[in-house]
Image (tube, grey):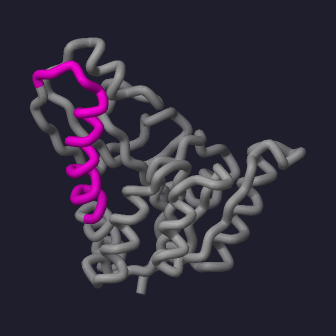
Amino acid sequence: MKKLAVFASGTGTNFEAIAKACAEGVIDARVEVMVCDVPGAAVIAKAERYGVPTFIFSPKSYAGGKAAYEKEIVQLLDEKGIDLVCLAGYMRIVGDVLLGAYGGRIINIHPSLLPAFRGAHAVEQAVAYGVKVYGITIHYVDAVLDGGKIIAQRAFEYDGNDPEEVHRIGQKIEHALYIETINKLLNESVS
């Protein structure tokens, strides 16, 4: 059985969708660890409900900065034999240490049709620009912010101006698309 690590920073809706899909056999994999950079984030309770071990850290507590905490994360991922790392609302830029060890095996979900509207405020930027077709992108993570090779995208029309509504619509699409994409990638790696 394939082993996943899910990284999250907030409420954990995508984490929960992935963990539930694994628990129900929709994804033939197991979430081995949930990595969170925000002590007290809601995703932690969700991981506990699913019996998923957690690695919770505060980046500011590492004197060596990003390289130091990523080295610790890589060691953990190696110990658990992780096949695929899924970023699910992880609000940190992945650095050289993690990319060096897991490059090509880290994917991210982003609330826009990349390459448009990169970064943390993609939906707000798209609404301000007057976009009429929004979307979700799943891509490989590389050294360029939201710039890795696109794996999957799904678009939807919206003619309003409420970023929260766009997030609500997009979130439903995110959960299904992420599960489909994880399955596709895991099946490709088996063959």
Q: Quadrant of residue 16?
A: bottom left
Q: Camera-side residue: 82 or 35? A: 35
In the current view of this chain or complex, which residue is farthest to the bottom? 1
Left or right: 53 as drawn, with respect to 123 = right
Q: Which residues are magenta?
A: 159-179
Q: Is residue 191 above or below residue 98?
A: below
Quarter of the rendering containing residue 23: bottom left
Picture mark count: 0
In which quadrant is the N terminus drawn? bottom left
Q: Quadrant of the C terminus?
A: bottom left
Residue 33 position, x and y percent, is 57, 72
Residue 5 lies, with reference to residue 37, above or below; the image says below
Residue 191 is inside the magenta segment: no
Question: Which residue sits at x=61%, y=56%?
Answer: 36
Q: For residue 160: magenta?
A: yes
Q: Going 29% across and 37% down the picture, which residue do you hit?
A: 167
Identified at 65% across, 73% down, the residue is: 78
Residue 48 vertical placement versus 63 (above, below): below
Left or right: 166 with respect to 78? left
- Magenta stretch prevailing secondary structure: helix
Residue 107, percent from left and from top = 43, 54
Position of 167 compared to 45: left or right? Answer: left
Q: Residue furthest top?
A: 129
Residue 47 can be seen in this image: yes
Please, is residue 95 above or below residue 5 in the view? above
Q: Residue at x 40, y 72 (%)?
A: 19
In screen coordinates, is 66 left or right of 140? Answer: right
Answer yes or no: is residue 113 visible: no
In x, y percent, where is residue 176? 22, 59
Q: Residue 87 location, x and y as percent? A: 47, 53
Q: Nearer the viewer, residue 181 or 99?
A: 181
